[in-house]
Amino acid sequence: MAFLTGRCMCEAVTWTYSGDITRNLVCYCADCQRATSAPLTAFLGMRPEQLSWSGDIRHYESSPDTFRGFCPSCGTRLYFRSDRWPHEIHVHAATMTNPDDYQPDAQVFMPSRVKWLDRLPTIPTHDGFQQRPSGPPAHRTALRSG
């Protein structure tokens, strides 16, 4: 049994969970990519009756009977739930108070995995943003050329 806590970026929404974890997945499906603006989503499957929320949560019905919860103040994506899995709610691992405690045990929808993720180990790393690029900011260039 696990006892976990989490929150959104602005801390307006918090959650606590005490129960068994039903899934620890990294998902590469196109829906999760679009919903989170990220190449993957890591989530924990939890029993809804053992999960407590505090704060205002808004919902988006991303497909029939499938909802994605988010904080209306900061926009943090909090969870995914669907009538296909009525006894689970899939909470985003990045919202955990200690996200380093997350231990995925499966990756799903591998055909949708973006290919550039394979290159990450060969790309230079930095402890913060690297130095500012030379030339005009890309957004100004794009606006002028459009």
Image (cartoon, helix red, strand yellow):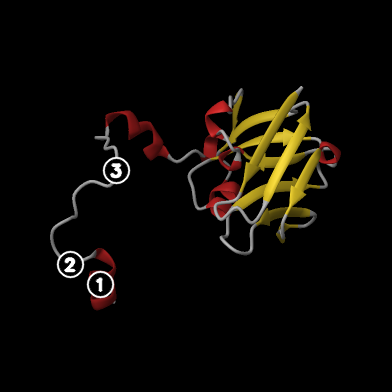
Tag 1: amino acid: Arg
Place of residue 22 in the rendered image (x, y in percent of width and height, measured from the top left): 75, 28
Place of residue 51 in the rendered image (x, y in percent of width and height, measured from the top left): 79, 40
Q: Which residue is mark 3?
A: 128
Whole-number angstrom distance, CA of label 1 to CA of label 2: 7 Å
SS at mark 2? loop
Residue at the (32%, 28%) spot, across then down: 121
Whole-number angstrom distance, CA of label 1 to CA of label 3: 23 Å
What crowding class fits label 2: few (fewer than 14 Cα within 10 Å), some (14-19), or many (20 or more)? few
Q: Are marks 1 and 3 in contact (CB under 8 Å)?
A: no
Tag 2: amino acid: Pro
Nearest the eye: 11 or 83? 11
Residue at the (56%, 40%) spot, across then down: 94
Residue at the (25%, 72%) spot, across then down: 140
| Left-right relation of 9 to 5 | left
Q: State the mark number for residue 136.
A: 2
Q: Which residue is mark 1?
A: 140
Place of residue 40 in the rendered image (x, y in percent of width and height, measured from the top left): 52, 41
Which circle, 1 or 3, is nearer the viewer? 3
Q: State the mark number for residue 24.
A: none
Residue 18 figure quarter: top right
SS at mark 1? helix
| Left-right relation of 142 to 116 | left
Nearest the eye: 84 or 51? 51
